[in-house]
Image (cartoon, rainbow, N blue to C red):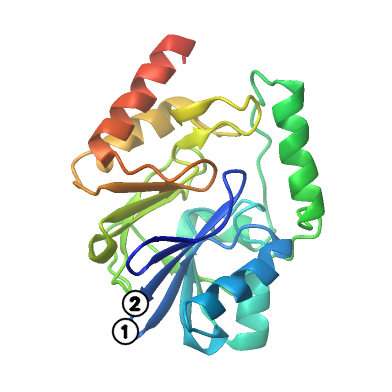
Amino acid sequence: MRLAPSLHRVGNDIVAVYLIDAPEGVTIIDAGLAGQWKELLAELDAMGRTLDDVRGVVLTHGDSDHIGFAERLRRDHGVPIFVHEADAARARGEESSKPEWGHVKLGATAKFMWYALRKNGLRTTPITEVVGVRDGDVLDLPGSPVIVGLPGHSPGSIAIHVPAVDAVFVGDGLTTRHVLTGATGPQPAPFTDDPARALASLHRIAGLGAAWVLPGHGSPWHGGVERAVAEVERAASASGA
């Protein structure tokens, strides 16, 4: 799906992957679920691109529903995978977390689990080799992604600011569709290691001025990052978080 010039999405509001299309090639933000591979190929084709044009994958964090086809790109096509150093072990499958689920609604949770099952979410291949990044890094990739540390959901969660497409990619730093309740609009994401820290971290992106806020789960937000952060804070306050 084309969101804007040079900005594309693969997947849907349950699990999303983003592509930045620049003259020098394509940068992929997150790698979703393994079974979204065919959708990736179809979107590249619609863009007039191929896997040979992909220069790198930048992961917002190392959870299984964000690394799905990353190892396949690395192993079979030589695409480097970038992840914050604090989440490198998680992306390699060496460690994981078991945060609280919190409130759930059966229908929404079942939809998320069924979609993940259909898209091979239980067959995620850990990434053998990753390139570590840190807060403040500007990557030599199409779009010149800027790394913004966003710890809380996981120790190495990051936002990725790409001024060239007026967007900040937030992974699970926030969500616009809660996969366990179905609630929509900017709000704290579930499965978060440290909810208080995740909420505080959002102040690090509030001043970026980006129009697009693009989460790993939920609809793309085009109302500006400042408003998105304010909405998350209101939702957290209303829920007592």
- Of residue 108 and residue 168, the one placed in the foreground of this image is 108
Which is nearer the N-term, disc 2 or disc 1?
1
176 versus 56 height, above or below: above
The label shown at residue 163 is none
Q: Where is residue 166 in the image (x, y as percent from the top left)?
A: 25, 57
- Of residue 101 and residue 107, the one placed in the foreground of this image is 107
The residue that label 1 is drawn on is: 23
The residue at 30%/72% (across/down) is: 143
Which amino acid lies under the numbered mark 2 shown in the image of this protein?
A: Pro
Circles 2, 1 touching at the beta carbon (< 8 Å): yes
Q: Position of residue 75 (x, y in %)?
A: 66, 82
201 versus 214 height, above or below: above
Residue 48 appears in the figure:
yes
Q: Quadrant of residue 237?
A: top left
Q: Is residue 28 left or right of residue 168?
A: right
Which amino acid lies under the numbered mark 1 shown in the image of this protein?
A: Pro
Q: Position of residue 77 (x, y in %)?
A: 61, 87
Assign a secondary structure to mark 2. Answer: loop
5 versus 159 height, above or below: below
Mark 1, Cα crowd under 10 Å, few <14 / some 14-19 / many 20+, is few
Assign a secondary structure to mark 1. Answer: loop
The residue that label 2 is drawn on is: 142
Q: Quadrant of residue 68?
A: bottom right
Q: Position of residue 116 (x, y in %)?
A: 74, 48
